[in-house]
Image (spheres, helix red, strand yellow):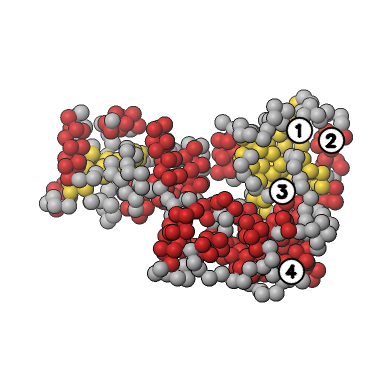
């Protein structure tokens, strides 16, 4: 199998490969097997004479051997820039060790255009933590890694490619889902155990120690405060709507806008609710976005934004948890964002993510703290002189009827193909709004999410009408004022592939 995969992915007659093995016997077997198939190879390990180890690397660099198989050697401190193939033949749960082994092939060298890494997953114990290996390589949360595996790694930098065969993909996905304590009793036991030695363990430390993601902590409408209580930790005095507001915190995990996070952390640090009327309009809207999301289920139709702020500040444990959460979210920001120049009072940032409620609050829509539901993909925001178009790329999941499975996708980084509602005619009032929005001074703003399972949409920014085909629905081409980033474009392309 190994020889076949090597032959399929590289040239055995010219490669310079390092193979990392489980044992001395394993390294000897691999070298013997490669030699048997005409690939000059040697095996070295910790007890090999220094001269033999140095000769092996020297022969590899000069092409006299094509593969060196080792045991507990060459993880770090070895410089062989000519290595262009790395064979991962042993399991390791250590992200550091994995990256050290990977790094042996990443040195630049004359005539070396790329490095091929073959990671032989094989059959491992159920407890083996593939999530640690791939998170070390890809970054992001365990859920992010799971999506990357499912979509065949669309977010890799230019020039990089990763492929898992069907069996390997199945093994890795199963490991990502099964190898950590994702059931509630197991999470409680994990926190209780960790607190025996570290009673003041915070959320960030708990995630590191347990291997869990934020999504795991907030799964099933639970919260960090719920988990702490269940594990016997002290929490602050609960407010009158404590349970409902704690459940809402999990709806904020998408927040990735630094201005927003900084504003929230600054206000939450104060024990007194802010005076909303004394804040600049942009800051008022930022707070409205938070209050509408966290307190939506307990707000009355006539509740003011100030009353909503007093309500949140009357729940000190919720406020404390929000402060801790926003500190973590700040460290997860991975996109550059641009303010929305067409609407300076709106705190939306291009390429950040927002829910429908947050989008409407950002435009100052609604007479009080509670935001009316926005269910369809189109919202005419007359007060902002804007048309808000929100669409889902992958409509294969439930929730879309045959008449609502519009074909929406990125044509390029600057052009978006979008289909109107199925009843829209070219010369209808709606169709004319789309076609003549520039003449009428109306702004078209696009929002997109990968699937219906995603609560939040990426804000793509202003767009300009560039033409359409047909009607009922109209197939419109929009040109974005700011092109998609490379990874967003790849993600959008993968979602409809």
Residue 413 point in image, percent of width and height: 62, 39
Residue topped by disc 4: 310
Asked whether the beta carbons under mark 3 and mark 2 sit within 8 Å of each other, the answer is no
Q: Nearer the viewer, residue 175 or 164?
A: 175
Q: CA distance from mark 4 to mark 3?
A: 24 Å
Residue 475 can be seen in this image: yes
Residue topped by disc 3: 356
Asked whether the beta carbons under mark 2 and mark 1 sit within 8 Å of each other, the answer is yes
Image quadrant where one finds the C terminus: top right
**Badge 3 density bin: few <14, some 14–19, many ≥20, Cα 10 Å:** many
From the image, state whether disc 1 or disc 4 is nearer to you. Answer: 4
Q: Secondary structure at mark 1?
A: loop
Which of marks 3 and 1 precedes in the sequence? 3
Residue 251 point in image, percent of width and height: 63, 53
Which of marks 4 and 2 precedes in the sequence? 4
Q: Secondary structure at mark 3?
A: helix
């Amino acid at each position: 199998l190994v020889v076949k995969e090597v032959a399929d992915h590289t040239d055995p007659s010219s490669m310079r490969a390092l193979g990392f093995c489980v044992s001395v016997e394993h390294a000897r077997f691999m070298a013997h097997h490669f030699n048997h198939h005409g690939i000059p190879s040697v095996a070295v390990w910790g007890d090999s004479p220094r001269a033999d180890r140095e000769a092996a690397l020297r022969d590899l660099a000069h092409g006299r051997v094509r593969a060196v198989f080792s045991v507990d050697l060459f993880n770090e401190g070895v410089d062989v820039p000519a290595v262009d193939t790395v064979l991962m033949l042993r399991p390791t749960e250590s992200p550091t060790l994995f990256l050290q082994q990977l790094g042996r092939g990443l040195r630049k060298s004359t005539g070396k255009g790329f490095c091929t890494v073959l990671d032989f997953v094989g059959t491992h114990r159920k407890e083996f933590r593939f999530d640690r290996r791939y998170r070390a390589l890809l970054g992001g949360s365990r859920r992010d890694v799971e999506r990357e595996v499912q979509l065949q790694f669309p977010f890799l930098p230019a020039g990089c490619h990763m492929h898992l065969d069907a069996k390997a993909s199945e093994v890795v996905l199963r490991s990502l889902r099964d190898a950590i304590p994702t059931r509630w009793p197991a999470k409680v036991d994990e926190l209780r155990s960790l607190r025996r030695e570290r009673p003041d363990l915070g959320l960030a430390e708990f995630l590191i120690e347990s291997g869990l993601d934020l999504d795991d902590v907030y799964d099933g409408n639970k919260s960090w405060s719920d988990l702490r209580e269940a594990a016997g930790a002290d929490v602050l005095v609960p407010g009158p709507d404590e349970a409902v507001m704690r459940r809402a915190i999990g709806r904020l995990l998408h927040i990735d806008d630094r201005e927003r996070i900084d504003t929230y952390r600054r206000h939450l640090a104060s024990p007194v609710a802010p005076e909303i009327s004394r804040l600049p309009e942009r800051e008022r809207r930022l707070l409205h976005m938070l209050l509408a999301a966290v307190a939506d289920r307990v707000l009355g139709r006539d509740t003011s934004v100030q009353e909503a702020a007093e309500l949140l500040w009357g729940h000190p444990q919720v406020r404390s948890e929000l402060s801790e959460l926003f500190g973590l979210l700040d460290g997860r920001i991975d996109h550059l964002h641009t303010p929305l120049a067409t609407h300076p009072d709106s705190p939306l940032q291009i390429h950040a993510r927002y829910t429908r409620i947050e989008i409407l609050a950002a435009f100052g829509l609604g007479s009080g703290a509670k935001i009316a539901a926005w269910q369809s993909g189109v919202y005419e925001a007359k007060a902002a002189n804007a048309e808000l178009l929100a669409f889902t790329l992958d409509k294969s999941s439930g929730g879309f009827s045959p008449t609502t499975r519009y074909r929406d996708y990125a044509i390029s980084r600057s052009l978006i193909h979008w289909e109107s509602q199925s009843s829209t005619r070219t010369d209808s009032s709606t169709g004319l709004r789309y076609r003549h929005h520039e003449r009428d001074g109306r702004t078209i703003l696009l929002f997109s999410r990968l699937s219906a399972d995603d609560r939040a949409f990426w804000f793509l920014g202003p767009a300009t009408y560039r033409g359409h085909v047909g009607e009922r629905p109209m197939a419109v081409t929009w040109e974005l004022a700011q092109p998609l980033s490379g990874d967003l474009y790849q993600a959008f392309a993968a979602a409809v592939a």
